[in-house]
Image: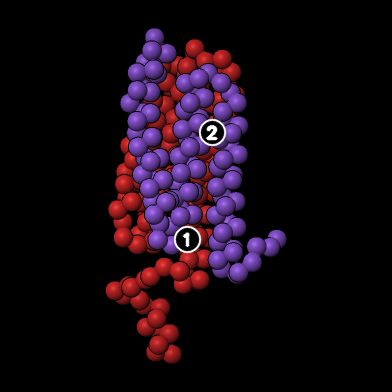
Chain colours: A red, B purple
Amino acid sequence: MSEILFYLGAVMIIIGGICDLFGAIGLLRFPNFYVRLHAATVGTIGGAVVPLFGVALLALGADFLPHRYAIAGASFITGIIVLLAAPAGATALAYAAHKAKLVEWKPKVDHLAEVRGND
Amino acid sequence: MLESTFMTLMKFIIPLYIAAFVIYAVRAFKGPSIPDVILAVDCMSFDIAAFMAILAVYFKSTFLVSGAITLALWAYLLDIYVAKHLARGEVGA
């Protein structure tokens, strides 16, 4: 039973590391701030929440750890905090960047401006 | 048995996280506008929080995870304050 939890957590940690690297490459290579938000979501949800839940499962399954229940519970709570806080922070940042007009933005289709222009 | 498996796992995991951290730092240093810098610092903080939870298992220490909780909350606070400063021009309650 403990081996199953341990290997499940190890697989989740490996998935988290790969997602984190891909999110970082996307954040470096994408052209625009609003496109970079997508890579940032990959880097936070896939790269922080998944390995934190993986650490929780791995610490529950690991027999060699002292205080393993404390590590498992604290990393589970950290995963829930990141899962709630990262989308809210990204949404607030995108709203602020659009409202302060800091980012150069050239959309191909803008339905809202068309509707407002017709009124 | 499980401990040696975890130590061989860490040999693959540590370079992935350090490479991701360096690439986030490059974007944070050269980001053209303020939201890019804040987004890169945000991703870097969540990355360090997850990496500290992994290092807590590696070093067998509980105290690293309490630092991870504080780091995640600090990144959210930075987001909200900078967004409010950019949108309204002030940082108030």
When asked about the image quadrant of residue B68, the answer is top right
| Mark in front: 2 vs 1 | 1
Write the residue at 39% across / 81% down: A113
Dot 1: element: helix
Dot 2: element: helix
Q: Residues within 10 Å of mark 2 (few under 14, many from 20)?
A: many
Image position of A76 with respect to A92: above or below: above
When asked about the image quadrant of residue A102, the answer is bottom left
Image position of B7 with respect to A94: above or below: above
Q: Residues within 10 Å of mark 1 (few under 14, many from 20)?
A: some
Q: Position of residue A23 (x, y in %)?
A: 35, 46
Q: Chain of mark 1?
A: B
In this view, the residue farthest toward the front is B29
Tell which of A98 and A8 is nearer to you. A98
When asked about the image quadrant of residue A16, the answer is top left
Query: Viewed as shown, does residue A72 lie left or right of B90?
Result: left
Q: From the image, tell me which residue sits under label 2.
A: A76
Query: Viewed as shown, does residue A93 lie left or right of A29?
Result: right
Residue type at mark 1 is Ile
Write the residue at 53% across / 18% down: B60
Q: Position of residue A34 (x, y in %)?
A: 39, 62
Residue type at mark 2 is Phe
Write the residue at 31% across / 56% down: A30
Regarding residue A42, the answer to whether it shows in the image is no
Q: Chain of mark 2?
A: A
Question: Do badges 2 and 1 share one subunit?
Answer: no
Q: Position of residue B85 (x, y in %)?
A: 59, 64
In this view, the residue farthest toward the top is B1
Image position of A103 with respect to B3: above or below: below
Q: Which quarter of the rendered picture does the C terminus of chain A lie within?
A: bottom left
Q: How far apart, in angstroms, are the residues tagged by discs 2 and 1?
A: 32 Å
